[in-house]
Image: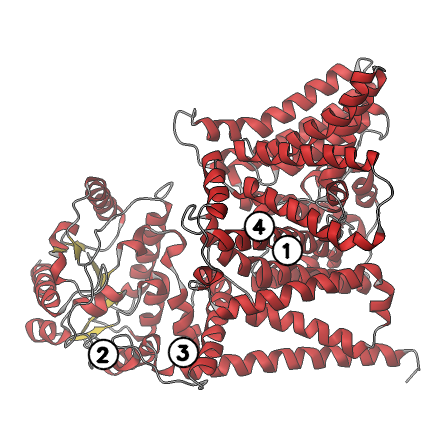
Amino acid sequence: MPASNTPRRLKFRSLIFLVLIFLSINLSAFYLIHVRYQDSYYAAMIDKINILESTDSPRLIFVGGSNVAFGIDSKLISQQTGYSVVNMGLNGNLGMRFMLGMIEPYLRSGDVVLVIPEYDLILNTNESIGPAFIQAIIANPNLLQYFNSPQEYYYFLKLFPYVYTQAIKTMVSDSIEKGCILCENEEQIYFRSAFNPYGDIISHEKIHPIWEIGHLYLSFAQDDSNLHTYIDIVNQFSERIAESGAKMVMLYPATPASGDQKTQEMLSLMDEILRAELTIPVLGNPDQAWYSRSLFFDKLYHLSVDGRALNTQRIIDQISEYFIE
Amino acid sequence: MDLTNPLLLILGLTVVVALYYAFPDQWRRYYLFLISLVFLFLATPQASLLLVLLSLFNYGMGIFIERASKKRWITTLSIFINCIVFLFPRYLNLTGTAAVPVPTNYLIPLGIAFITLQNISYLLNVSRGILPAERNLLNFLLFIIFFPKITAGPIESARHFLPQVRQTHPYKAENIHQGLFLIGSGIFKKIVIADRLALITDQVFNNPGQYYGLTVVTAVFFYSFQIYFDFSGYTDIARGIACLFGYDLSINFNKPFLAENINEFWSRWHITFTTWLRENIFFPIRRFLLRQSNNATAFLALFIPPLITMLASGLWHGLKRPFILWGLYHGLLLFFTVLLNKSKKPQNPKNRWGRRLTTFGLVTFGWFFFRASSIPEIGIFLQSIFVKSTTFHDLLLDIDAFDLVIAFVAIPMVMGFEIYLHDSQKAWNELPAVIRWIACLAILLSISMLGVYQPGNTEFIYAGF
C-alpha cells in the first residue's frame, strides 16, 4: 500500500466510525422510544390489524379517526346486521391514505369498508396528517409496509424529526423527574388496552365526561384542493378493492350541532361535491350526525357512552337502508 | 426542498448533487438553472412567472443601458419598474385595496426583496460602466434565481457571482466537506437554537400586555439571539448548498455582537445588504451633499445619509410603521455614533467590553420596533417593561427547563466557536482530527436529537421579506 494512501484511508475509517457512532446512539434512542410506546394508544393499531386479519368475512370494516373509535358499538352492529365488525378507528392524524392502505391487504370478497372521516380529513391541508402518524409507526415500524404512495414517505420524513425529538425530550424529562427511562403509561383513557375485541374504545365508559365541548367550526382553505385530494384517495382505493370483491361506502362523523351559519353552508356544499364526485355511496348527510353537546366525552368527535348508543343506531339505520337498496 | 428539515434536505441534496456531478461540466449550468426553476415554481407557483419575466426584462435592459446614450433615464426607469414589482403586492396587502383578498404567494415571488436589490445593483453597475452587461441569458438567469440564495440571500453582486457562473465546476471533495460542514452548522443554529428561542419569544411577543418587567426584557434579548441564529443559520445553509455545487456565496455575518458601536455593528450584520445600502444609497447621497460645499450641507451630510439609508432599510423589510420606526431609530444611532466619534479622543481599549455591551443593548432595544406588528403594540411592550414588574419565574412557568438549559448552553458555545473559527481557521484545521470529529458528531447528534421541529413553524424570519 503506498504511503500517500494512508491518511485517506484513515479519514475514510474515521468517517465510517463517526457514522456508526451517530447511528448507534440514534438507534438506541429510537429503540428506547419504541419500547416506551408499546403501551401507548397508537400501539393499539398493531392489535387492530390482528383483529382485522383474524376476523371472518363478510365483515363491516369501519375506517376513520377517533370518531370511529369512540362512536360505534361494534357488537350491536354485528348483532343487528349479521356481519362481523372490525373497528379500525384510532386517530384522524394518521391520514386517510394510510388508514386505507393498512386495511387493503386484508380485504376479501363480501367485505364492506365504511369510511367515517373527521371533517379535518376531508378539508384540512396536508391531508390532516399529524404526529399520530409517526407515533403509530414508532410503536410498530412494520406499519411502513402499508405505505403505497410517495406522499406518505414525504410526510414521514417531514414529521419524523418533530415526533422523535419530542419523544427524546419526554424521555429525558421522565428520567430526571421520575427516575425512570421506561416509565409506565399513566394515561387514563388513551392507552393500548383501552379497546374491546372489536376495536371500540371502552376505557372511558366508567369515567365522567371531562369537559364542555366546543362548537364545530369549519372553513375551506384558499381553494377546495384538499377536498379533491380526499375524493381522489377514496375513489382510487374503491377502484382497487373492487377487484377483490369488497365494497365501500361513506358516512358522516358525529359532531355537536353547529350553530354557525357558515359552517352549515360549508357542510352542505361539501356534501354536494362529495355526492357528485365520489364513486362510492354517501349514506345520510352531515346534520343527521349532529348531537347534543352533552353526548360528547372530552373532544369534538369523541362521543360518550350515551352518544355512542345513539350514533350506533343512526349508523345501523343508514347501512340497513343501503343493504336493502 | 425544505431547508429546515434535515431528512428532506439531505435526501433532496444527495439526489440533486449526485446528478449535478454526473453531468459533463458544460451541462452543469443548465442543470442548475433547471433545478433553480423547479425550486422557485414549487415555492411560489403563480408568482414565479412574474419573476422570470422580470429577470428577462432586466437582462434586456442591461444590454440596452450599455448601448444607450441617455443611460441615466433608462436606468431610472428600469429601477422604477423593479421597485413597482417589488412594492405593489405589498401595498395591496397593506391597504387591503385588492378587490378580492389576494393570498400573498399569488403575487409575491419567493425572495423578491433580495432579487430586486440584486437587479438594481446590476443595472446601476452596468450604467456606471463598472460591469459589462451580461450577454448570456442563461448566466444572467442563474445569477438571479440560483436556488440556494433565492429564499433570503445573501444578496450577491454580479461582479462576484457572474464570473463563477462562467467558470467550470469540477468535482472537489474539499467543496463537499466545506459545504456539509456549513449546512450542518446552519441547521444546528436554526433548529437547535433559534427555533428553541422562538418558543420563548413568540410566547411573549404574540401576547402583548400579558408579560411584564424582566420577562419582556429577557424575551427581547432572546429575540436578539434568535434573529441572529435564524438568519446566520439560513446563510450558512445557503452558502453550504452553493459550496456543494462549487459556488461561493458572500459572507453575511461577522460576529456582529462584538461590534463596539452601531456603525461597526452594521458592517458586521447582514453584510451583503448593508454593503448594497452603502454603495447605492448612503454614498451617493453623501457625495451629493458634500458637493454643495457650505456649512449647512456639511452638517446635513452627517445627518441625512444615515437617516435615509436606514429608513430605506426599514421600508425594505416591509411597508409597516414599526419597520419605519426601526429604520429611523438606527439612522439616529448611526448619526450620534458619527458625532461621538468626531468629538472624542481615541477610545480606551480597556472599555472594549463596555462598548460592546452598550452596542448590543442598543441593537436589542431596536428589536422591539422590528418584532412588533403595530405602533400601539410597541407602546404596550415598552410600557410593560416599566409599569409593572414581575419575575422571570413568570416566563419560566410555560417554558420547559429542558429547552432553556439547551439554549443557555448552546448560545455561548456556538458564539465562542464562531469567534474561534473566524480568528483562527488555520488553528481549527490544525486541531487533532479526533477533536474535529467529535465536534462534528456533537453537531449531528444535537440536530438529530435536540432540534425543535415544530410542524408549521419552521420558516426563516428573513424568508418573510
Q: Do marks 2 and 3 share a chain?
A: yes
- Disc 2 chain ID: A
Q: Few, some or many C-alpha atoms within 10 Å of disc 1 (few <14, some 14-19, many ≥20)?
A: many
Give the numbered dot on residue A139: 3
First along the sequence among labels 4 and 1: 1
Residue visible at 78% across and 34% down?
Answer: B338
Give the labeled residue for mark 1: B229
- Disc 1 chain ID: B
Three-letter amino acid code of the residue under disc 4: Phe
- Residue B331 location (% of width, % of height): 68, 33
Q: Do marks 2 and 4 share a chain?
A: no
Give the labeled residue for mark 2: A195
Give the labeled residue for mark 4: B460
Residue A321 seen in the figure: yes
Which label lies toward us, 2 or 4?
A: 4
- Asked if the residues shown at circle 4 and circle 1 are in contact, with their CB atoms under 8 angstroms apart, the answer is no
Residue visible at 76% across and 21% down?
Answer: B300
Classify residue B298 as left or right of residue B57: right
First along the sequence among labels 2 and 3: 3
Which label lies toward us, 2 or 1?
A: 1
User: Real-space Cα distance between discs 3 and 4?
Assistant: 32 Å
Residue A54 falls in which quadrant of the image? bottom left
